[in-house]
Amino acid sequence: MDADARAAATCASCGSADVEARRVRSAFWHDDRLVVVEDIPALVCGACGEHSYEDYTVIVLDLLRGGGFPADKARGELRAAVFSFFDGVAEKGES
């Protein structure tokens, strides 16, 4: 997106003009695997945090997803802690 278009951008969610181009990361479920894609070009609202993407970006993400996110093409791996929702509410339900 060129500088003029970025300057004219407003957030579709809250209407703020505090929108800037950034590179973001997002997680996707693919079958039973959680994968992370980094360096996604996005417009990010400084007021509400909403992300928006150009059509080209969405197409590339769809192509990555359609390719199955092969493990041998991954740049790295992240470890993530896993919690159950019920770990946080079990004590409240037991009075």
Image: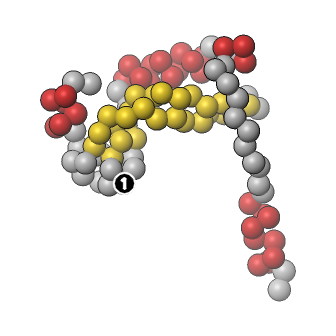
Q: Indicate the quadrant containing the N terminus: top left, top right, bottom left or bottom right.
A: top left
Q: Among all residues in the image, which is located at the extreme bottom?
A: 95
User: Which residue matches tag 1?
Assistant: 48
| Whether residue 91 can be seen here | yes
Residue shown at 60% from the left, 16% from the top: 66
**Residue 13 falls left or right of residue 60:** left
Q: Position of residue 63 (x, y in %)?
A: 54, 15
Q: Residue at x 57, y 18 (%)?
A: 64
Q: Position of residue 86 (x, y in %)?
A: 78, 64
- Residue drawn 52% across and 21% down? 62
State how the image is colored. Answer: secondary structure
Residue at 76% x, 32% y is 32
Relative placement, left or right, of 23 versus 12 is: right
Q: Residues within 10 Å of mark 1 (few under 14, many from 20)?
A: some
Counting from the top left corner in percent of width and height, residue 3 is at 19, 28
Figure disc tally: 1
Instruction: Tell me: residue 44, above or below residue 94.
Output: above
Query: Is the C terminus in the top left, top right, bottom left or bottom right quadrant?
Result: bottom right
Residue 10 in which image quadrant: top left
Horizontally, residue 92 falls left or right of residue 64, namely: right
Disc 1 is placed on an element classified as loop
Is 32 situated left or right of 63 in this image?
A: right
Q: Quadrant of residue 85?
A: bottom right
Say above or below: 33 vs 73.
below
**Amino acid residing under circle 1:** Cys
Q: Is residue 68 visible?
A: no
Where in the figure is residue 4, as x and y percent of width and height? 15, 29
